[in-house]
Image (tube, rainbow, N blue to C red):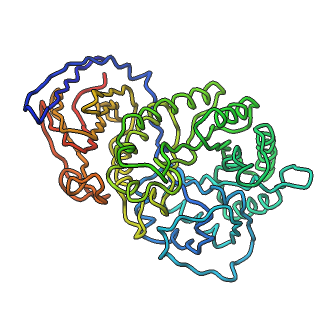
Amino acid sequence: MVFCLFISNLLLATASLHLTERRIQITWDRSPRISENLISIAAGPGIFFNNQGCVFENSRFIKYIAALRPGYLRFGGTRADQMTFINASNPEEICDLRSLHKIQKPFLPVTLYREDIEKLINFSRNTSKRMLFGLNLNSRSKDGSWNSKNVELLLDFFKEQNFFPDFELGNEPNSYLHHFNYTMTPEQQANDFEVLKLILARKGFHSSKLIGPSTTGRGPTALNYFSKFLETKPPVEFAAYHHYTLNGRNATVKDFISPSSFYAYEDEAKLWTETSKENDKKPFISEGALAFGGGAKNISDRFVSSFLWADKLAMSALTGIHSFCRETAFGGAYALLNEDLLPTPSYWISFYFRKFIHGRISSLQTFDDNQQFYRIYNVCTNKNKVTKLIINPSKATVLRIEGKFESYQLIPKGRHLLSKYILINGQRPSIHRTRRETGSGSLLLQHYSVSFIRTNISCK
């Protein structure tokens, strides 16, 4: 179909109005369908190492994560490659949620007991999140082969609980030299996946999918490992990697709204997705956020992160990525929930994206003239109507829209980019109700806004 999109730039300094008409040709049936599992979350064994496992029984935590269902709960990370399961009760089980904001120290072994796995299973069921469980690839025999004994013990317990998750085998294997002082090759990891496939079949895990290799890094070395792994034709359904756009240790507010940060993920998502599909695998981000290293302190958990996160979700959908496991549910500056288990701005972006963006996603328009930058994604929803996601980290803009529409604009409380709080149509957000605003013909997009516009324009 063809429809007209009218964009008016409202230049506040001169109060002049410049109107540009653009016609977009969209073939919706060729547009990627947005995966219902796109918005997923990540957590790791460090939760139990730090005696915080009772968070999975916390009613507030369950409520907010359940509101993002379905999707995955990815339980993995560096400590998954140092994890041992003991099929017994924890003799010293305690719980302390006072330190949820602390970054977990990596590279220390962790033991999980029956109660820990039961908490994860119940949480998965209570939130309707499918479990993606990271298995220990780092357990090696003297001859260098993968030692699967403890994994098999864990699988037996899962089966006893009538719980059959999907599995990763290894976390960031291309960095084993850094983490564990030896090199993992893509061929060896692929071979270990074959062994795991046989074990799962023998134990009756017929519905469990395998996901890997879960590499880290954005450069040619990481892509080379990823490509070589896929070229071996491993028994994985999803080709997984990790993605962070910025370095949390030195990222600035300017980096979070710089057009170059948006373009970086756009280019890389297309490249890694193309590599996945060339090898007949579905792309999957098993861990990622905006900035690594726990996020950027006092930035990743503020409204300024909303623009890049909304764009990362939309670009993931546009390039056909099946799931994006957001690091992390809690802990660190990049968490979706803060130390009080209350939503951050990124949580609300995720929630409203899930609420309004579904069906097929088609075109992206970027407007970048060195003075103003904004992006518009067009979506054909399940109701066969066009919805627009508009990301505007700059000046106010008038958008002319054909016919009637509903608008939902998210802005920072106090109009400050570093606000911890978000407003939708001038009110505090809620998972239970959302105030709508209606209009016809044109809409003033507020500066520093992420907007969802539900139109009456038919997709056909």
**Residue at the spot 22% in from the left edge and 20% down from the top edge:** 4
Quadrant for the C terminus in the image: top left
Q: Is residue 357 left or right of residue 232?
A: left
Quadrant for the N terminus in the image: top left
Q: Is residue 428 left or right of residue 343?
A: left
* In front of the other: 390 or 148: 390
In the picture as drawn, the residue positioned furthest to the left comes out as 15
* In front of the other: 386 or 40: 40
Residue 193: quarter of image = top right
Image height check: is 97 above or below 63?
Answer: below
**Residue at the spot 20% in from the left edge and 26% down from the top edge:** 7
Q: Is residue 380 left or right of residue 282?
A: left
Q: Position of residue 85 (x, y in %)?
A: 73, 66
Q: Position of residue 313 (x, y in %)?
A: 43, 41
Image height check: is 371 above or below 66?
Answer: above
Q: Position of residue 316 (x, y in %)?
A: 47, 36
In the picture as drawn, the residue positioned furthest to the right comes out as 143
Image height check: is 103 above or below 40?
Answer: below
Residue 359: quarter of image = top left
Q: Position of residue 304 (x, y in %)?
A: 33, 49
* In front of the other: 429 or 178: 178
Q: How many marks?
A: 0
In the picture as drawn, the residue positioned furthest to the front comes out as 250
